Image (cartoon, coloured by chain):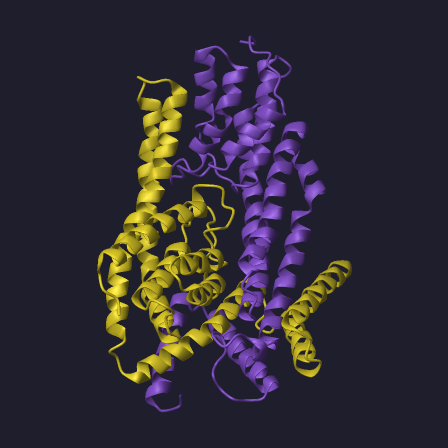
Chain colours: A purple, B yellow
Amino acid sequence: MHSGHEEIGTADLLGVLGRSLLIQASWSFERMQSVGFAYALSPVLRKLYPDRTEYESRLKLHLDYFNTQPYLAAFILGAVVRLEQDRATGLNTTADIRGFKASLMAPLGALGDSFFWGSLKPLAAVLAAALIITGSWWAPLLFLAIYNSVHIGLRVGVLFRGYRSGGDAVDLMSRYRFTYGARVFKVISLTVLGGILGVMPLWRQEFRPAVSMPGMLMAASGLTITLVLVAILRRGSSPVKLMLGLAAVCLAMAYAGVI
Amino acid sequence: MAMFDMHMILAVLGTAVVGALVGLDRTAVGQVMVSQPIVAAPFVGWMLGDPITGFVIGVTLELIWILDMPVGTFVPADSTISAVSATAIAALAYPGGAPLPVAGASILLTTGMGLVTMRADGMVRHWNARLADAIETDQGRDAESRLARAHFSGLALFFMKSFLLYLIFLPLGIAAVTVFQHLPQNVHRALSLFVMLLPLLGVALVVRKLSMKTVDLFFLSGFVIAAVMGQLFHAPAVIVLLLTVTGGWLGARYHAQRS
């Protein structure tokens, strides 16, 4: 069983990282990311287990149901590489790798969804939208730069941290402070959203209603309409229904001669 | 006015290929956010000679769909297909710069596509499960080849889904928007206003998701900072937005210290 004794180096971990970019390429309702997880791990497993039967058995183990936030999957991948290495070299042959994956995937999924989808992405998008609305056409590049400087940096960092710590989630949390970051990003997004309305008179003409009114009044009108829409959304209306409703209101105003 | 000549057919095919490639970023590959409307729509608009329409549609749809998150088994509506389709429909139906009401009509048309894209995505994810099952049942090949084959077949399915949807949506949308120009002027005026109100709806949707309150203090603070600096001190928009970011950052730190 312990015939591999291969050292896992930086190049192997970078290989896992590269393959982890495709972790959701065959995402399915039944197995979710399991095929992608096994695909990312397969070159390392091949190196650790030269015996074909054992290699296939380990690969099959990693085809079990797996789903987490795709970026933070890198942490679990790094940790699993370490655990498989320890197993193959005889350092720790009793580690419950299946249980380890199962215990981490849900918490990291929730953490990653909240941080990346729920706060980093809105922050980058809100900043870029604010700049585009006021005429900075380069803002989509800023969006990509802000998002990916954090995303790619973290993806690389957590993979190596997962490998070094062997999957110590406490170490991960103390190093990256995802919850605090998410809170800060959300607050900044909210102030920038308010700022977008505050500079409404400075919007490019493609975005600004063609009405002549004092700047402050225009901004206040924008704020009022937005707060009314927030109140309607709180009553459970969906974005699609609200869009259709808005179109209907505009049509009614046009036919009533208001616009 | 749009004509389905060879140029148009090639443009539709090109948009379908580019849109499907960009769309892989949503789930299957990398998730570096090039598939987000704020990036994809201006890119396709630039490719088709109408970047302004791309910016208008991209910003609007980004704000509207940004917090529709892929959590667990939930598959959100494909905002990439909506943004790319709306931009391409407007740009191809009105070469040289689509008027604002046409952008509005395109957005309305693609809103209805959301349900179809969700169904199609669901089908792909069920097929992917069958591909994954084949890894364990097809014993004739090397395990690694079986794994790679299943994984990349999933990737191909994601691509084909988007490609085929574009081939259906784009010609239908172009035909519909071409008919749109014959509608009464009231409809054009209404849709012009509709497009200008959509950023407010977008802001409302993001505020609704980021804050528990209808009237959020950070949101209002951003508004006041921007209105005062932009209207009273006539500061440039970029400076005003930087001040709102700083205000948000300080507010978040203060809030964290207090709690």
Q: In the figure, is residue B80 to the left or right of A8?
A: left
Q: Is residue A192 visible?
A: yes
* Residue A94 can be seen, yes or no: no
Number of residue marks: 0
Side of A228 relative to B126 (left or right): right
Q: Measuring from the top left, give residue A108's x and y in whole percent.
A: 57, 41
**Above or below: residue A50 compared with residue B178:** above
* Above or below, comparing residue A253 to residue B103 in the picture: below
Q: Residue at x 39, y 26 (%)?
A: B147
Against A206, residue A36 (above or below) is above
The image position of residue A27, as x and y in percent, is 41, 39
Q: Residue at x 48, y 38 (%)?
A: A67
Residue at 45% across, 76% down: B196
Frontmost residue, B40 versus B158 = B40
Q: Where is residue B198? Give x, y as percent.
A: 45, 72
Q: Quadrant for the C terminus of chain A, please.
A: bottom left
- Hey, which quadrant is residue A194 in on the image? bottom right
Front-lying residue, B232 or A156: B232
